Amino acid sequence: MRGGNASLHAVIRRAHLRMAGMAIALAGALLLLVGVVVLRFYLLNNLQLMARSLAYTVEASLVFNDRDEAGQMLEQLLRGEDVARAQVFDAQGQVFVHWSSGKSATGGVGEVLAAVIGIKPGEAEVSQDGKPIGRVLLYSDGAGFVHFLYAGLAVLALCLGISGYVGMRQSRRMMADIAEPLQQLARVARAVRRDRSMDQRVPPARIAELHELGDDFNALLSELQMRHERLQQQNSVLELQALRDGLTGLANRVYFEQRLQQALRDAHDAGHKLAVLFLDNDRFKHVNDVHGHAAGDALLKAVADRLQSLVRESDMVARLGGDEFSILLYPVGGVADAQFVANKIQEAMRDPVITGNGVLLNPSVSVGIAVFPQHGQDMESLMDYADQAMYEAKLARRAEHSLLEE
Ligand SMILES: Nc1nc2c(ncn2[C@@H]2O[C@H](COP(=O)(O)OP(=O)(O)OP(=O)(O)O)[C@@H](O)[C@H]2O)c(=O)[nH]1
C-alpha cells in the first residue's frame, strides 16, 4: 500500500480470492441443497420401509399380547439403524411397547436437524386378516443427515482451500504478467523525472498490449534523450559564445570580470595577492590602415596565442575588445612577479608576425600592472589603476620611439 492506494497485486489477489470463494460457496450451497432433498427422500423412504417391516414383525406379539417379545423384536430390528425411538400402539391406540436407542450418537443434534428438514416419523399399520390391530411409529435419529452434513462441510472447506491456493497462484502469475511491466514503467518514469537519467529503458513484456506500451514509452524516451542532448549542445555553444571572444577564442570581458571578482573574493579570504595586467596594442590602427583589417585580425590572433602561452593554467588571458587584452595572475607573489610576466610579454612580442599572405607585422603592446591589495581593493579600482599604468607606459614608449626616430 502506498499513500492509501491498494497495490495492483493486492487488488488482483483480492479479486481472485473473492471469485473463487463465491464460486465455491455457490456450488457448495447448491450441492448441499440437492443433497438435503435427496437425503430427505431417502431417509423418509427408509423409515417407512422399516416401519412396514416392523409392523409385520410385531403382528404376532400384538395378537398374543406379548410385550416382551415385541420389545425384543424391536431391539433386534432397530439396533444399529438410524432410528432414535419406536412406538407400537395397540388397537385402542395405547402404547403397547416403546423402544429407545438410548444416548444418540449425534447428541440430539440429528433429531433436531431431521425435524428441521421435515423428516416425519415412519408409520405403518399392523393388521391381521385385513383388520387393523395396531400401529407402528419410528422416529429418525438424523445420524445419516448429520454425517452427510459433516462430510459436505469438510469437502467444501477442502475445495475452498484448493481454490484459494489456485487463486493465489493465478494472481501471482497475473502480477508477473501485468503488474511487473507497469512497475518497470513507473520505475523508469520516476528515474527520468527525479534523476533526469534518460538512458534507462523498459524491458519487453509478455502481454502484447503492455509490450506495445513499453515500446512506445521507450521510443518517447529516445526522442526526449535526443532533444535533451541537442539542447545541451546548443546550450554549451551559447555559453561558449557568451563567454568567449569570437576572433581569438580567449575569454571575453564578461567572463574575465566574473573570474576576477571570484579571484578577488578568494584572495581576500585567503590573504593572497593577485595582479591584473592591462595591455593595448601600439599603433594598431596603422596596421589596419596600411595592411587591411584581415592583417589586423591575424595580428590580434597571434598576440592572443603568445599571451596565452606565457601564463599558468590558474591565470586568465582575455580580450576586452578592439586591440585591448587583460591578464589575471592569481595567485601572485607581488608587483615583482607581475613585472616579470610583463617583461616576458615584451620579449614574446619581439618576433614578427607573418600573416597568411606573407605580410610581416611587428607586434607591440603597452602593459600596465595593478596588484591587489596594494593598488586597489575592488575590480573597478584595479582595472582603472592598470589602465592608467598602461597609458603611462604607452606615453613612455611613444616618447622612446620619437627619440629613436630623431
Ligand atoms: N582588425 C581589427 N581591427 C579592430 C578590431 N577591433 C577594433 N579594431 C581597430 O583597432 C583600432 C584601435 O585603435 P586605437 O587603440 O584606438 O589606436 P592605436 O592605433 O592602437 O593607437 P595607440 O593605442 O594609441 O597606440 C581601431 O582602428 C579599431 O577600428 C578587430 O576586431 N579587428
Image (cartoon, rainbow, N blue to C red):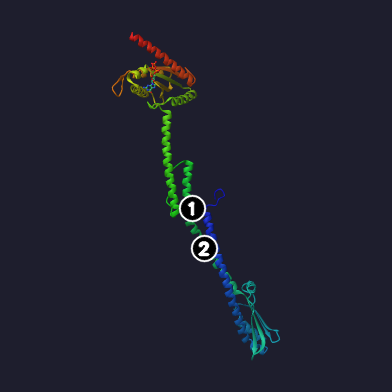
Vertical comparison of 200 with 251: above or below: below
Mark 1 neighbour density, 10 Å: few (under 14) some (14–19) many (20 or more): some
- Residue situated in front as seen by the camera: 318 or 88: 318
Instruction: Tell me which numbered mark, 2 or 1, is placed earlier along the sequence.
Output: 2
Q: Residue 90: x and y, percent? A: 69, 86
Q: Left of 295 or right of it: where is 170?
A: right
Task: Give the residue at x 44% y 50%.
Answer: 214
Task: Give the residue at x 35% y 9%.
Answer: 403
Amino acid marked by disc 1: Ala
- Residue situated in front as seen by the camera: 123 or 74: 123
Amino acid marked by disc 2: Ser
- Element carrying mark 1: helix
Q: Which residue is mark 2?
A: 163
- Residue at the limit of the structure toward the left, as seen here: 358
Quadrant position of ligand 1: top left
Q: Left of 338 or right of it: where is 161?
A: right
Task: Give the residue at x 53% y 55%.
Answer: 11
Task: Give the residue at x 49% y 59%.
Answer: 170
Q: Which residue is mark 1?
A: 179
- Tell me the distance, in whole angstroms, between the alpha carbons under discs 2 and 1: 22 Å
The answer to whether any part of residue 389 appears in the image is yes
